[in-house]
Image: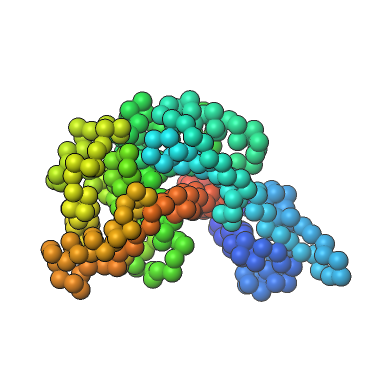
């Protein structure tokens, strides 16, 4: 099969995958109608996808046609989310983002061995796990692949994601907690294609952080460090404080939030600003809005949403990012290179 034929087949196969994933179950005629492919071609491709395990062929009582079901458990995601210093949430998700299992662990997650134990336990239980997703405070520096996190000293500058890919042979991703959360917020609400959403996370025991989502994509910056508000010139010199040494009783938290939110609002003019922090008072959004109005016109201050519990958006966002990585992709450059050899 030459390059053009293979490319055409790959495109048709991906179209068929996408359609049946949305329909969940359908006969050949319906798949043909939605994809625009000939029924014979659909049947051939569908049977190939059955052989790979992506489709499941079914007979439905009373129906004469053969039905195909999208196998949402063909590949699974193992997501491990770390909140603050001792809250770890483990989720196994199918390809629809539906959780097959969720576990909460109370422990100090500050070593690589801690994560290895979880991965090995769950991979033994769910052999279909096809991707490892980790979410925590800090970020992977673009280029070096090293983790920069003031909150977990033993993991500082470790090539965290590379370690797990090499050891377990699985694609892996590492995402910052608030970046994953803002993606989860965006994906579970109704926003326009170009809508910009900003977010701040102010945990009680760890350093605060910020994030921006524009049109459904996280804005990361040159080094993946966009949103690291601890480097702003605020009343707190964050680099001098470890994760267990923060004392918010000695500073004005409303002023701190305004100092962190103002650059975000000025430079990105978001359509919505989300504040996370389960220890913050109920009037957090109102107080922050009042302080922003001291610095800018009312028209430029975005709606502010206060969400005490970051966990639901954190989990949803991390799983969403993982599923995007798992989506079958066509590498045109690779295929063209193979065709020229």
Image-quadrant location for residue 117: top right
Q: Position of residue 282 (x, y in %)?
A: 33, 58
Image-quadrant location for residue 137: top left
Q: Position of residue 29 (x, y in %)?
A: 73, 72
Does 40 sit above or below residue 240? below
Image-based side of 46 in relation to 181, left or right: right
Image-based side of 48 in relation to 285, left or right: right
Q: Which residue appears at 47% of the width and 62% of the height? A: 188
Q: Position of residue 278 (x, y in %)?
A: 37, 50
Say which of 330 and 251 sits in front.
251
Colouring of the image = rainbow
Does 153 sit above or below residue 307? above
Say which of 239 and 250 sits in front.
250
Q: Which residue appears at 23% of the width and 33% of the height? A: 241
Does 132 sit above or below residue 256? above
Q: Which residue appears at 47% of the width and 38% of the height? A: 88
Whether residue 171 appears in this view of the structure is: no
Say which of 46 and 245 sits in front.
245
Q: Position of residue 256 (x, y in %)?
A: 20, 50
């Amino acid at each position: 099969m030459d390059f053009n034929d293979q490319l055409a087949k790959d495109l048709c196969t991906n179209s068929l995958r996408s359609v049946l994933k949305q329909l969940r179950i359908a006969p050949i005629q319906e798949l043909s109608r939605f994809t625009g492919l000939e029924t014979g071609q659909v049947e051939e491709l569908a049977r190939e996808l059955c052989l790979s395990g992506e489709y499941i062929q079914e007979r439905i009582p009373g129906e004469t046609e053969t039905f195909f079901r999208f196998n949402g458990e063909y590949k699974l995601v193992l997501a491990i989310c770390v909140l603050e210093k001792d809250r770890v949430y483990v989720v196994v998700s199918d390809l629809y983002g539906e959780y097959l299992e969720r576990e909460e662990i109370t422990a100090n997650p500050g070593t690589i061995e801690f994560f290895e134990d979880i991965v090995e336990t769950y991979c033994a239980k769910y052999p279909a796990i096809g991707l490892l997703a980790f979410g925590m405070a800090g970020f992977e520096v673009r280029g070096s692949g090293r983790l920069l996190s003031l909150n977990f000293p033993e993991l500082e500058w470790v090539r965290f994601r590379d370690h797990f890919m090499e050891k377990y042979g699985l694609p892996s991703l590492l995402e910052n907690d608030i970046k994953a959360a803002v993606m989860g917020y965006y994906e579970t609400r109704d926003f326009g294609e170009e809508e910009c959403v900003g977010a701040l996370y102010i945990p009680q025991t760890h350093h605060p952080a910020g994030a921006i989502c524009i049109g459904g994509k996280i804005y990361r910056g040159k080094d993946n460090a966009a949103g690291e508000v601890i480097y702003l010139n605020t009343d707190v010199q964050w680099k001098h404080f470890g994760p267990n040494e923060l004392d918010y009783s000695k500073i004005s938290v409303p002023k701190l939030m305004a100092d962190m939110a103002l650059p975000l609002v000025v430079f990105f003019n978001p359509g919505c600003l989300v504040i996370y922090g389960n220890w913050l008072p109920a009037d957090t959004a109102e107080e922050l809005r009042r302080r922003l109005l001291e610095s800018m016109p009312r028209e430029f201050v975005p709606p502010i949403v206060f969400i005490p519990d970051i966990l639901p958006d954190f989990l949803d966002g991390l799983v969403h990012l993982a599923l995007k990585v798992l989506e079958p992709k066509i590498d045109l450059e690779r295929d063209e290179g193979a065709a020229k050899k």
